[in-house]
Image (spheres, rainbow, N blue to C red):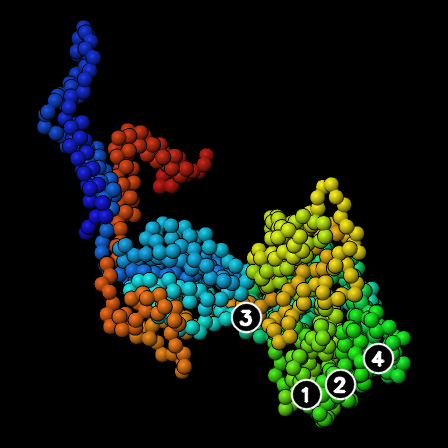
Amino acid sequence: MSFVSPLALLGLLFVPAVVAMYLLKLRRNDAVVPSTLLWQRLVADVEANAPWQRLRRSLLLLLQLLLVLLLAALAARPFLERPAGLAGDLVLVIDTSASMAATDVAPDRLTAAKQLAVDALRDLPAGGKVSVVAAGRTARVVVNATSDLGRVRAAVENLAVSPASGDLGDALNLADALAARSRDAEILVATDGALATPPTSRLDHPVTVLQVGRDRKNQAIVALAVRPGSSGVTRSVFVSVANLDIEPAKRRLQVYGDGVLLEARDLTLDPQTRSEAIIDDVPVGVRVIEVRLDREEPRAATADVLALDDRAWAIVPPDRLRRILLVSDGDPYLETALTFLPNTELYGVAPQDYGVATRPELFDLIIFEGTVPEELPPTAVLAIAPTTTSSLGEVVGTLKDPGIGSLDPDEPILRYVDLSTTHIGSAVKLALPAWARAVVPGPGGAPLLYIGERDGRKAAVLAFEPRQSDLPLQVAFPILVSNLAGELMGGSAAPIGAVAPGDPVPLLLPAGALRLQVTRPDGTITELAPGTAGGAGISFSQTDQLGVYTVVPVYPEATTPPAPAGTPSADPSGSPGTSPSPAAPGGDSPTPVPTPAPADPEAPNRFAVDLFDPSESNIAPGSAAAIEALGIGPGGAASPAPSGSGAPASAASTGSPSASSGDAGSTTPDRPAARDELWIPIVLLVLAVLLAEWMVYQRDAVTRLWRGLRTRLGQGEVAPAGGRGPGRGRGV
């Protein structure tokens, strides 16, 4: 046994001091008394206090000497050594993604993971250094290369769940770069393995996984939208709920409008499937829709262990009139779908009557069915089944019973659109222009629907007439028409898409406003000002909470807000220049845009942040072995890697000794032993000795207390009047 602070053993010098207190004579005051007859009992005490006489046996003295020995040992910090189980430079990666909030382990997965990580630090060698990386939506270093384990424990305890999809691969790459500073380094990962994006990069250091979680019971809200009702006055709420468990579940769906319960509905969810629900008759004037998943029976055991995805919000877009012109001989299916678009006026004209007198510049979208004019109007255009080649595309033939190719799940126009059961009788065979992207691919590379931007205006071509297919008979048809019309008119006609947690949101500063005040869901307020004088755009990035954010412009006290017509967003035409474009041609998923500024410049503007990620809501624990296989194996040998994969160049570029596989491959640097300090049993012994010393010193009081307690217990066993106590009989 060794000591961390051996100089603390100098505290043993207090042992002679304690003994001296028992040897030295107590000083007493002299007093004259007539007789010592009644003082005989004090003779022993007087003799005991004679200086430097032989010590007598005293339990109190022994306890005090033992207490001094224990306190000196506690200050010296004795420890036992054993082989270290971790490397001298440890990078600790803690998964803080949304799935770590699951409560299948008490109290939740993140707390259990943090406890496992703190317990694992006991295998750290003496003098070892620890870095902590939080693996949320993005990786961040919490503690960097410190040997202060108290600081490490405090940093780990302060980690909280991020309600977003995690990127463990990014965190592992960062951890690998941190570990490259030392020859003896290791990466320790605390995670549930339920990864929305599994990591694939090879690492130059060994990886050990501390896995938590055991259940996959979860139901999640994965989509929320607001649609116009059939009456054109009210609106309907479209909700998609996914059961990610392997067993059926029953949940209660509750819909709130501005905090008022509108409807509750019981859902029976099949395993591994999605269920859609439509709630009609949402009153006009409601601005915020909230949907909650609750248990069907209040006392029933819940089958959902993740609550983050049980609530979702949607912002009802403000009324904004749009005008659509349909140039067609008559298509009842298309006319019906266009009629039910929110805040839209539909006009119709025959192809032979279309011309300059129609005033095409007054419309936000013009749809040509069958024919396309030689000169396109200066607005957004949708051509349906064009018969001849035009500037919108080249017609190269016809297609009979064309099949639908593989669809892009991130395509914004196909959001909530299921075309898996759609059959098309005939279509026009088109060549995809260079300015467009294919939305619905067809056979042989011929697109069935494409969209793009031509000469600064949006344009799209649908290769078949809706009535030449069974698409109008499906729920997907009005949704497809709504998404397509919204994309062409410079903003989605569907409700504003939710912002993913952590994504930045562009905010418009109204003319004359000094700054914006953003109120987060927890009530905290953040003030934003443009980076440059006269700037009109501000990016808000603190979207790390789920819920509704409210944006209010702040104007100078001495000025009056400008008229609503002066703000760009108040333009009812919806021209592309007044708001950010939802997506670039061929780009990724659309950039979420908050609600356009309302007519009243002082009215609040809102946007919602929701966790619509089925991959993150799938909380089934993943494979720890797959994560560990990304690192090198025992002895520095690399784990088997897929063909063509290589180690990342981050470690090699640093010039660290660990960058060379030969340097770290054959031998492991000598590690100091791990230390197990014995302060816990010593503290318990100190407390026990203190208790014993107090009982010896107060033995008379303890004896009286014990006798009183026995008396009370004995009285409790006495039988009531007229009865007989236990073990007692009446004499004859």
Q: Of the residues tagged 3 and 4, which is closer to the observer? A: 4
Residue 269 appears in the rendering: no
Label 1 with label 2: CB-CB less than 8 Å: no
Label 3 with label 1: CB-CB less than 8 Å: no
Q: Residue 214 at what x, y percent from top left?
A: 46, 67
Secondary structure beneath dot 3 equals helix
Residue 327 is tagged as 4
Residue type at tag 1? Ala
Q: Which of marks 3 and 1 is nearer the N terminus?
A: 1
Secondary structure beneath dot 4 equals strand
Q: Distance between the residues labelled 2 and 4?
A: 16 Å
- Sort mark 1 into few (<14), some (14-19) or many (20+) by Cα contacts within 10 Å: some
- Sort mark 2 into few (<14), some (14-19) or many (20+) by Cα contacts within 10 Å: some
Between 364 and 286, the residue placed more toward the observer is 364
Assign the C terminus to one quadrant of the image: top left
Residue type at tag 3? Ser
Q: Distance between the residues labelled 3 and 4?
A: 43 Å
Residue type at tag 4? Val
Q: Of the residues tagged 3 and 2, which is closer to the observer? A: 2
- Is residue 9 found left or right of 407 in the rendered image? left
Q: Residue 697 at what x, y percent from top left?
A: 26, 30
Residue under numbered circle 1: 431
Label 3 with label 4: CB-CB less than 8 Å: no
Residue 390 is tagged as 2
Q: Of the residues tagged 2 and 4, which is closer to the observer? A: 2
Q: Earlier in the sequence, mark 3 or mark 2?
A: 2
- Sort mark 3 into few (<14), some (14-19) or many (20+) by Cα contacts within 10 Å: some
Residue under numbered circle 3: 615
